Image (cartoon, grey):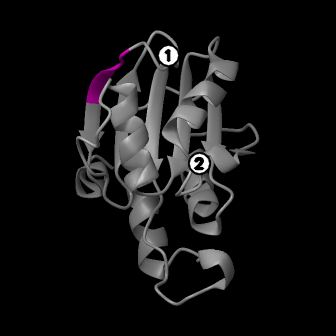
Amino acid sequence: MEIYLLRHAIAVMEKYPNDDRPLSKEGIEKMERAAKGMKNIINGIDVLLSSPLMRANATASIVAQAINYNKKILITPFLLPDAAPKLLIAFLSKYKTKKSIMLVGHEPHMSKTASALLGSQTTIFEMKKGALCRIDIPEPSQTKTGTLIFHCPPKILRELA
């Protein structure tokens, strides 16, 4: 299974209820360009999951449009910023028959989840806003270790557009 982990784009800095901030104009523009670059390195997505927070869901929508993902974006609380990576990984087993899945969420959750999928109990890298990584794993599991295929900062994704 190909697992793509994407951190949401730049959001506005003002405080919103429950920290549910929308994307900034800059965040939207940069993600639209980065998503065009993603189209050049992603060969389709079977399932697109997003955090319920506005900034992640808006990011998922931008990417879905750019990569021609025509299915419903599924929302899950397992992608909230303070969610436990092991619970997300267990949840992903529901999709073990799928070839590729994209997860759109937040820090520090994205980096912790990527690290867990790679077999580390500590965070081994950080994902910037708008960064994308791909980890291939036979099936999501606490005991199986995946392989990091790439980790692209947003600037590289925009250059690929």
Place of residue 39 in the rendered image (x, y in percent of width and height, measured from the top left): 44, 39
Horizontal placement of 123 versus 34: left or right? left
State the image quarter where residue 68 is shown.
top right
State the image quarter where residue 122 is shown.
top left
Q: Which residue is mark 2?
A: 79
Q: Which mark is residue 32?
A: none
Query: Of 29 and 149, which appears nearest the observer?
Result: 149
In this rendering, the count of numbered labels is 2
Q: Which mark is residue 1?
A: 1
Instruction: Give the residue displayed 63% in from the left and 48% down from the top.
Output: 50
Place of residue 81 in the rendered image (x, y in percent of width and height, measured from the top left): 52, 57
Verify whether residue 157 appears in magenta: no
Place of residue 52 in the rendered image (x, y in percent of width and height, measured from the top left): 69, 57
Which stretch is magenta? 145-149
Kind of residue indicated by mark 2:
Leu
Kind of residue indicated by mark 1:
Met
